[in-house]
Amino acid sequence: MPSHVTEIPAADPALVAAHYAARLSFETDCWDVHAVLEKGEPDFVLLDVRGPALFEKAHVPGAINLPHGKMTERKMAEWPEDTLFVVYCAGPHCNGTDKAALRLARLGRKVKVMIGGMTGWADEGFAVATGL
């Protein structure tokens, strides 16, 4: 008799590879963002999509505060068309990153979500910046 784990067979390895490759094209994590920022040569723009008050309290060093509601074609024209934006909000309980990613995609911009947001950043023990 199969267990709860094996009662549904595992997917074919090729399907698993395709699934996770696709998933990673939509998201990144706090550790990877931190590692790139530590090197000092980010190849993306990091956007904190929370409101200014939360941003001022604590944010990822190097992030720009740009709430998703302020992401307009005019505002985003400040960056080259091929810019990759990495967006984050408070954490897994917040859908601000989803709204930001949707808005950026509708504006024809490349975007990834930093999963975990500020909660994930804190869980990793990474330093935060304060102020605007």
Image (cartoon, grey):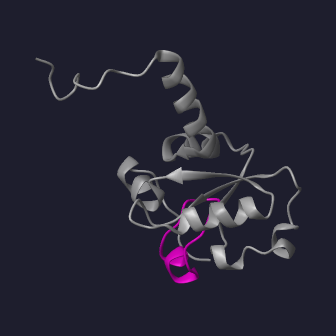
| Residue at x 56% of width, y 62% of height | 98
Picture layout, residue 50 above or below residue 110: below
What are the residue bounds of the magenta stretch?
A: 48-62
Q: Nearer the viewer, residue 36 or 76?
A: 76
Image quadrant for the C terminus?
A: bottom right
Residue at image coords 54%, 77% = 56
Q: Nearer the viewer, residue 115 or 17?
A: 17
Which quarter of the image is occupied by the N terminus? Answer: top left
- The image shows a total of numbered marks equal to 0
Q: Residue at x 31, y 21 (%)?
A: 9
Vertical position of residue 19 compared to residue 118: above or below:
above
Residue 35 % position (x, y): 57, 39
Image quadrant of residue 108? bottom right
Q: Is residue 55 left or right of residue 36?
A: left
Q: Quadrant of residue 62?
A: bottom right
Q: Nearer the viewer, residue 64 or 126?
A: 64
Quick check: is 61 in the magenta stretch? yes
Q: Is residue 29 above or below residue 67?
A: above
Indicate left or right for 118 with 63 as reference: left
Of residues 123 and 23, the one drawn nearer to the viewer in this rendering: 23
Question: Furthest-left residue in view?
Answer: 1
Give the percent coordinates (x, y) of residue 93. Answer: 38, 65
Residue 115, x across and y down, in percent = 49, 51
Which of the 4 image quarters holds residue 38? top right
Let me know if residue 68 appears in the view: yes
| Residue 63 visible in this rendered orientation of the protein | no
Q: Residue furthest bottom?
A: 53
Q: Position of residue 66 (x, y in %)?
A: 67, 73
Residue 94 is covered by the magenta coloring: no
